[in-house]
Image (cartoon, rainbow, N blue to C red):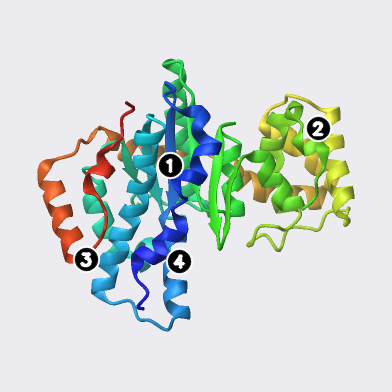
Amino acid sequence: MELSAEMVANIYKINYAKLSPSLNALRESRDKVCLVMDLGKILDSFYAIYHRKQMNVTDRQKKSIAMAILGIMAHYRHFYHDNLRMSNSIILYCSKQEQYTKYSDILGVVKTVVDVVPSTIYIVPTEVQSEDPEFYRHVAMYTLNQMNKMCETQTKKLHIHVLSYDPMHSLFFAINPDVRILWTQSSTIKIMDCREFWLRIVSDEDERIKSYRQDYELRSLLFPYLVANRVIKGYEDIPKPIQSKPQDKLDVLFESIKRFRRLSQVSVCQIYLRSVYDTDEKYERAFSAIRSVKFYGSPEVKQYIKLFNGVMTKKIKDPALSVLSALVEMTNSSLNPMWLTENKGV
């Protein structure tokens, strides 16, 4: 049987029966949920699977992949609407500039539809110059932060669901305590909060990680810990920490937390790195690398947001649904176009 785009997309669709036990506490709440999708990472995985099957991606298959991406969005949006009865929004982005170019044909189809789908933000590539290697992820984070503030003015919580596992997703935990990573791999399905993310990284049932007393600190220090201990690719030039044994690394982490509580995220990071490195030169190199990525809200990000403000005010239009219906028929997709419009709670 030929591998279809929908079969690959099913990797990213957690069965509703698996989602419900972890998320049913949100049912009919006045809160809001936002799904965050790194389309670049998802499309990388699509192409890798096709490559392993020695299949070329034709123009027709590109349209099918675009429909499969929309199908993933519709899958979760329908769950939020029909099962949890919650208002919801979706943020789509590629973490790397080159992914926007590589997958331009597929992303063009997705954007055509998304432009008229309510409460959906597609972060487009920009000419804004930035040396930030995580520029588009930071735009997504900044957008989430603004949404979070808006929810707070309405006495609501914003629940953030990030699709697929990636150590870089640890950045999202720093901006909101209500973040979940929706992750599927083979037969494994996980809905990870910050502590479960920590336990996956350290592979140790450390009781200190399970304690809610260090919620703020564990969220603030997750990314610095991953960088300092070289868990994230791209930081190989960061100096090695003094400690080498896993337990020693955790002991230093929690000693830092115990001595200094409830400071700013920058201060918490600085104190931890001072405990990890034995020279100022090593500390400065590590802190500079972490600060450039972790502490977002740069002028470039704000400039980008200003240029593309108001995206979420667009409403669904009947002609767009007609175009989408035609694509569904042409690609033999099982996508229900109406599910994409289910952005409001019941």
* Cα distance in 3D space between marks 3 and 2: 54 Å
Q: Secondary structure at mark 3?
A: loop
* Cα distance in 3D space between marks 1 and 4: 19 Å
Camera-side mark, 3 or 1: 3
What residue did someone put label 3 on?
331
Q: Is residue 285 visible?
A: no
Count of labels in the image: 4
Camera-side mark, 4 or 2: 4
What residue did someone put label 4 on?
44
Q: Viewer-proximal residue, 106 or 99?
A: 106
**Residue type indicated by callout 4:** Asp
What residue did someone put label 1 on?
35
Q: Contact, CB < 8 Å: mark 4 with mark 2?
A: no
Q: Contact, CB < 8 Å: mark 1 with mark 2?
A: no
Q: Determine the image quadrant of residue 334.
A: bottom left
Q: Residue at x 32, y 47 (%)?
A: 74
Q: Contact, CB < 8 Å: mark 3 with mark 1?
A: no
Q: Which mark is residue 132?
A: none
Q: Residue 33: x and y, percent?
A: 43, 33
Q: Viewer-proximal residue, 125 or 47?
A: 47
What residue did someone put label 2 on?
257
Relative to residue 69, is residue 42 drawn left or right? right
Q: Earlier in the sequence, mark 3 or mark 1?
A: 1
